[in-house]
Structure formats: C-alpha cells, structure tokens
Image: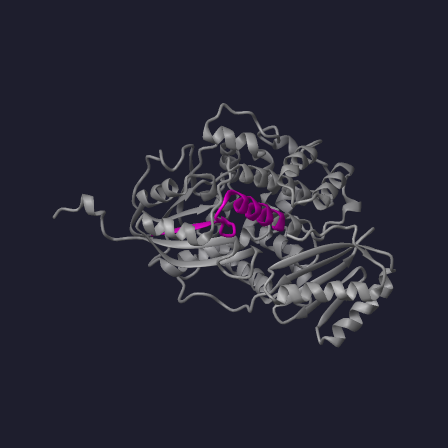
Amino acid sequence: MELPRPELLINSVERLESVVAKVVQECQNGLPERVIHLSSGVGWPALRKCLSTYARRIEAPVEEWESGLRMRLPRVVVVIEKRASSVVVHGHRAGPGGTRGGALLPVPERAAEVWQLAGYLTGLADAGFVLTGAEERLRAALKHESWLVATLACDVLNRFGVPAVPRFVRDHEPHRSVGTGAPARGDGTFTEVWEARISVDEYALFEAVHPGYAVQMVELGRMVRSHCRALPESVLDVGSGPGLPTVMLAEMFPGARIDAVEPSPAAIPHLVRNTAAHAVSVHRTGITDFAGPRDYPVTVSVGASHHMDTRMFLRGLKRHTAPGGLIVVADEMVAPYASESERSRAVIDHHFAYIDQALAHVPDSHLPPAEQLRIRALRDTDRRVPELLADLLEEVRQDRWFPVGDDSPWQRVRFCVLELEALVAGVDYDVERKTWVENFMTLAQDEGLEPVEHRRVHATVGGRDLDAGTHVVALRKSHLAPLASRTL
C-alpha cells in the first residue's frame, strides 16, 4: 500500500492537478478508495480555481464550498478539501446504483420508516454523490432514534467530506460506561484473550463510525427478505458483541424474537443495556455450547466469524438452523494469501484502508490535544514494517479519556485505535483470524451449506467483488438430514 504521507508538497497548481488526475485514474481503473494528504505551498483560492478549471476541462460536474469541492466522473467521485496545514484528496469508486436481487417480502409495518430511510441513504452511497439539498436531511438523520439510520447517515456524510458522528454516539455519557475502556488481562481462555487485545468498552461506543458498518446490515436484511418465504418470527444472532448490529436487526424486523448469543463477559453488559428496548434475549455462551432451539428459520452473524474457528462456527450456525433455513453472515474478509507474510500484508492493507477512510476528512487542528497526537501518529507511520505497528499501538493507546462536550469528531480517531488493535491481533493470528471470501464459501460448502448470494458491500483493497472488504454471504441449509442420521 502506498502511504498517504503529509510530507508530500504541492508547490504549484499543476502539481495538485496531477495528484487529482492520478487519484481519478487509480479509482477508474479499479482501486476502491484512495486518500492522499498533501502539504501546500500554494494558497487555497489559487488551488480551488485551478481545480474548477480542471473539472470543466474533463467535463466533470463539480460542487464547491468555501473549503473544498467535489467532482464526479463515471464510476469515480473525488473530494478535495483544504485543512489548516494540508490538502486532502479523497477518491472513491462509485457504483452504478439500482436495486439488487429479485422480489422481496414486504417491509414490516412497524419498520417502514427505517427501511424507507435506509433505502434513501444507501441509494445516495450507490449513486456516488450527495444530491443537491441532501446534506441537511443527512445531518438530521444523524439524530434519528434508529441506530441503523443514524449510522448510515454518518457513513454517507463521511464519504462525501463531512466527518460525521451519530448523535447516539456523541450523546454517550462516559460515567455510564460499564467497564474501564482499556484492554483487560486474561488467563488464556478465548474470550479473555480477546478482551486482552481489544478494548471492548470503547468498541461498544465507536464501532458506529466504522466505514460500511450499517450498509452490511441493510444488505443482510435485504437478503433475509429476498430468500425467506415469510418474515422471520425468530432469529438467532451469533456473536452479538456489544449489540449494535443486534439493535439494527431488531429495528429492521421488529416482529421477530431475537436470541443473541455472545460469550464475552465484557461485552454482555453492553449487549443487555443496548438491546433492552427490543425483543432480544441475551445468552452468555458461545455458539458451540449454545443449548437453544435447533429450528431457527433465520440465523445471522455480523463481524464474528473471524474471531472463531471457521469450520466450528459454521457447524454451530448449521446446527441451530431449521432444514431449508437461511444463514446470513456479514464480516470482513481479506485478499487471498498463500503464506504467513502474504497474510500479514493482506491484514495490514485491509485494516489501514478502513483507518484511512475513517480519518479522511477529520481536521486534526480542531481535535483535543491527545487526539491530535493520535491522528498524526496513525497517518504518519510506515506501514511497510509490521514490527513497528505494535509500537505504534502502544503509543496511540496512551491517555484514553473521554473529551466531554467536545464537538469535534474525536470518536473517529478512537475507532482507528480499535482498528489498529484488530490489525496487530490479526498479524499475530491471535483473536483476529481472517480468511478470504472464496475460501469462506468453500468451507461453508464443505459443511453442507449452499451459498445462495454474496455481495461485497464495502471495498478496502481490490476492485473485484471477491476482493478484500466487508462481505455479506447468504447460505441455505439443506432440507436433507446428514447421511449418517438417515434411515436406509
């Protein structure tokens, strides 16, 4: 991965034009997203005038505001913004839009507004631009009582130059946190090892600014509506964590009873509190030990498969799903690898893509001092040397406090610390055990599960649907019993 280092200097308007042209070409040719930070020796008015002229020359519609502009080309959107001491160029590949799949079950009546707003917001993301006048509506959506809607609005705004944070995250009262906010020390059991590597309390707060987080839930819900004969009355949610995806699931399907299975002692208090207003029953256990029903019509799992033995995870999902039932897994997958070094490189590139996307538009000069130090360290590190990343993690873990009353998007910086924790754990292959999507579907087929639909909903590395990013996979459990249990 080429580093977006802020030491790169723009000493002429032509230099900025060439950087923008490079980003346009990279994204047109398949790169899903590109973020470059540049130091500028040229005044912003001259740079903006040059960019406006360049946009007209290449026949790209352009939207301008005081500190930036956005240009649209086929399959590509580029945002250029002036910061206090730098210029950020953020390009991303835009999809063709349109709907996916075939006929859908009707939207649950009590969830009609949620589905309507989710369709509107994902449509903006697919179209690759924010419609004129849409920003005000998007900012209002950040305050929506639905966590799904607010998180979607946050993601769309960030993609187009506004480093937003959902209101339910901003309004969190630190004294209500049920833990310490820092990784704990464990005795070697799986869940305690996870809690020793990942700050669960902060994860419960800041995962809502994870790029593509809500989009995966909308796609998961669409697959349920597309591949089930009726809206589910019960759903098994495996690896619920602190509960953000579980709440989103309940918002989309309020008529369903959800059993949330989660083994982590640190995550359980968050899960119980976050889901208290919904029809969710919490079970503190892992899927391999879960003693619940074995006939769920729908079983789902979000962001959990890479924390487990993949085969045992799939067997657990299959064991509790009814014959002919649907299993939908949403999770992060990396590029294919054939060696330990290739795996480490794939994990690093994947996680730093999320970090770059989350921080693309965060103005470091407006952050609290501790967050300024964090964001600069995250942006400036040499990512080509894996051994330096553990040292970087120790550096950015310092002074983890909650800047109460600060309106800057500091939560985005703190999310990136969590992403770095996951990266270092993934390189160690400790509690992060990522695979690639083709291998995941092969393992599912080995367990007798039929892949019925797959989509990459958020790209990190590569231009193909099978490349790295956030993926959603729908699987069908066979109507037939295993051969060993059938009567001949």
* Residue 328 magenta: yes
Who is closer to the viewer here, 201 or 318? Answer: 318
- In the image, taking residue 293 as reference, residue 398 lies left or right, namely right
Relative to 194, is 165 above or below?
A: below
Residue 233 visible to the viewer: no
- In the image, taking residue 94 as reference, residue 466 lies left or right, namely left
Residue 91 visible to the viewer: yes
Q: Residue at x 56, y 66 (%)?
A: 95
Who is closer to the viewer here, 326 or 16? Answer: 16
* Residue 265 magenta: no
Residue 309 at x, y percent in the picture: 41, 39
- In the image, taking residue 289 as reference, residue 181 lies left or right, namely right
Q: Which residues are magenta?
A: 326-353
Residue 221 at x, y percent in the picture: 45, 55
Residue 29 at x, y percent in the picture: 61, 66
Q: Residue at x 31, y 43 (%)?
A: 319
- Marks counted in the figure total 0
Q: Residue at x 67, y 42 (%)?
A: 411
Who is closer to the viewer here, 7 or 475? Answer: 7
Relative to 78, is 416 above or below?
A: above
Residue 211 at x, y percent in the picture: 60, 51
- The quarter holding residue 36 reads bottom right
